[in-house]
Amino acid sequence: MNRLSSNVMLEELKAIASDTEIVDDFPADNHSQINIAERKHEAADHSEICSVFTPLHFEPNYAYPLLIWLHGEDENEMHLRQVMPKISMRNYAAVAPRGTLSLSLDEQQSPQWSETFSWSLRNGDYCEAIERVCMAIERAEERFNIDKDRIFLAGKGTGGTMALQIGMTLPEMFSGVVSVGGPLPRRDALLAHLNKSRHVPVLLSVDRDNDQYPDTMVCEDLRLLHIAGMTVTLRQYPAGEVLRDSMLSDIDQWIMDVLASEKKTPIVTG
């Protein structure tokens, strides 16, 4: 399966977003075996900030699958700390860029921890989101041996919707897309990409009675993806927690299934 390199994407995006000076800062995390490195930049748009997850018992010569995590609304890139131990501590290198839409700031806490963000599908923000994902891939490739044919894009809520948008617009870059509680983007432009993105498997994880992603919308999304001939797995969970542990552990199992299978599977509901 052919992949576009992040360098190629960044060259194409130079006409959209201006380059800025990059400064690296990788603080040590002495409180956990999860090695998270934060990429920081003083620019106001925070476009160079991301978190990087080093798998447990890291092997430098092993080509790791890469998982890109797009956080949900009112969160930031540090959400990677919470999700990776529940997805897998060993199987992936992972990165999480910061969302494009800045939200509230709790003045009682340090900005590093209290700034919250989301993802906007407006044209300008969408182009910036693509750039941030490509830059996150580049950071991972600088730090780890990444298998370019095993890159997965996942997200929660608005991050899940953005993951679907990016994954279906640039299917050459990804081996699969995961959305946890994030509906298919309601954009006419997305429909134009359905045919070329049909080879990219999709996992939709939803909890029942979700006001942000009701059952009627889930059924509509399944219908559109089915018409496009895409490989879709739907997993529904009892109403309650927005992001339950079983949702995250099931992401690992789904990715393992995708990597183990070379052919499409029909829509599965479980």
Image: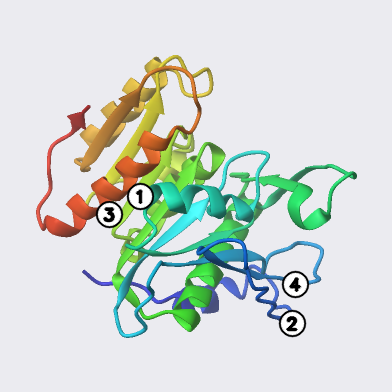
Sequence-wise, which precedes: disc 3 or disc 2? 2
Marks 3 & 2, CB-CB < 8 Å contact? no
Mark 2 Cα-neighbour bin, 10 Å: few <14, some 14–19, many ≥20: few
Instruction: Choose the circle earlier in sequence order: 1 or 2.
Output: 2
Q: Label 2's element?
A: loop
Q: Which mark is residue 196?
A: 3
Q: Nearer the viewer, mark 2 or mark 4?
A: 4
Q: Any mark on residue 21, and which?
A: 2
Residue 2 location in percent, x, y? 25, 72
Q: Amino acid at mark 3?
A: Lys
Image-based side of 159 in relation to 150, left or right: right
Image quarter in which the C terminus is found: top left
Q: CA distance from mark 2 to mark 4?
A: 8 Å
Kind of residue indicated by mark 4: His
Question: Judging from the image, what secondary structure is the residue with disc 4 in?
Answer: loop
* Residue type at numbered disc 1: Val
Residue 261 in the image: x percent, y percent?
A: 12, 55
Q: Are marks 1 and 2 in contact (CB under 8 Å)?
A: no
Q: Which residue is mark 1?
A: 177
Residue occupied by mark 4: 41
Residue found 34% across the figure and 43% down from its top: 249
Disc 3 to disc 2, C-alpha distance: 35 Å
Residue type, numbered disc 2: Glu
